[in-house]
Amino acid sequence: MSIEQDLLAPIKAFLYVETPQAWIDKAKLVENQSALLVDHMICELKAAQTAMLLIRRYAVDKDSGDALMAWLTPYNDYVYRKQGDWKALSNSSLSKNIVAKAGTLYGQDLIDKMVLLIKEELHHFYQVVEIMQARDINFDFVGSSRYAKELLSHVTTHEPNTLIDKLICSAYIEARSCERFAKIAEHLDPILNKFYVSLLRSEARHYQDYLTLAEQIAGEDISERIGYFGELEARLIREPDTDFKFHSGCPV
């Protein structure tokens, strides 16, 4: 078994359905790859934002929260305000150590896993921007996909179940990203093929980190809740979708 197959086996077992062939057929068309790269760039930033918000909401004091916000500000400015030099993003880093606030049993573990995830997502963001620049791909505002909004709309409203649900949703989003990288890599040009294959290892670990945290915080069996979101995620992937994005459903 190859490294890629070894990494993908647990992801395929975790996801309830594979990506529809219709989505793959559309994604591999040359005329759609610019749109896919733009959305991929946004997805990497949103993944970093999600991890940052989880740390700020559940694990740190205001000073550490402000440091996390400052870390992401240049990336937000570049995407949402068209400000800043993209090359400078390669030097952006966290300005201070992030320490868990008192009284959170899982705070430091959440910080450790999420800070590493943010670093990797921002590195991937920069890599996508680098490819886009080399191909003269410009971008306008890109709205959120139906997929993520629908998943998160089913998150419960009382803690700690809210946090547990958010972690489960993030696990499915990361797992689906990884599965789709693998699905389309073989159909793309050598540069994109190498890039997407290179993402598999870190993305495979990301979904596992989210699940581990969810189980740790719950302190009990959450397989029923994982299954609930697994079925919901599968429905969103199978349903017809007029919007073509990295996490969109079956193209109409």
Image: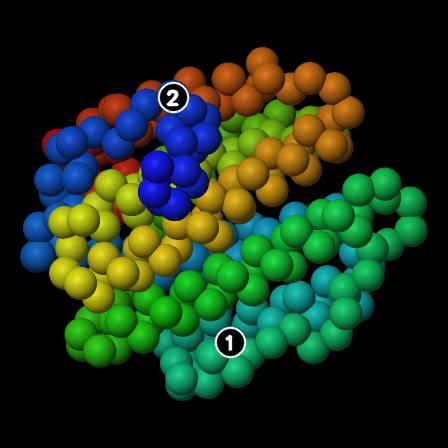
Horizontally, residue 60 falls left or right of residue 151, namely right
Question: Which is more toward the observer, 240 or 44?
Answer: 44
Report how far apart the C-alphas of labels 2 and 1 lie in the structure: 37 Å
Q: Which residue shows up at 83% across the image and 55% down it?
A: 100
Q: Toward which corner of the image does residue 37 lie, by quadrant?
A: bottom left
Residue 4 higher or lower than 14, as above or below: below
Q: What label does residue 74 carry, if any?
A: 1
Residue 50, how many percent across, how many down?
A: 56, 50
For badge 2, the amino acid type reads: Tyr
Judge whether residue 123 can be spotted in this image: yes
Q: Which residue is mark 2?
A: 16
Residue shown at the point (43%, 57%) measured from the top left: 44
Q: Residue furthest front?
A: 1
Mark 2 against mark 1, which lies toward the viewer?
2
The single residue placed furthest to the right in the displayed view is 102
Q: Is residue 80 above or below residue 227?
A: below
Which of 122/58 is in front? 122
Q: Residue at x 71, y 68 (%)?
A: 66
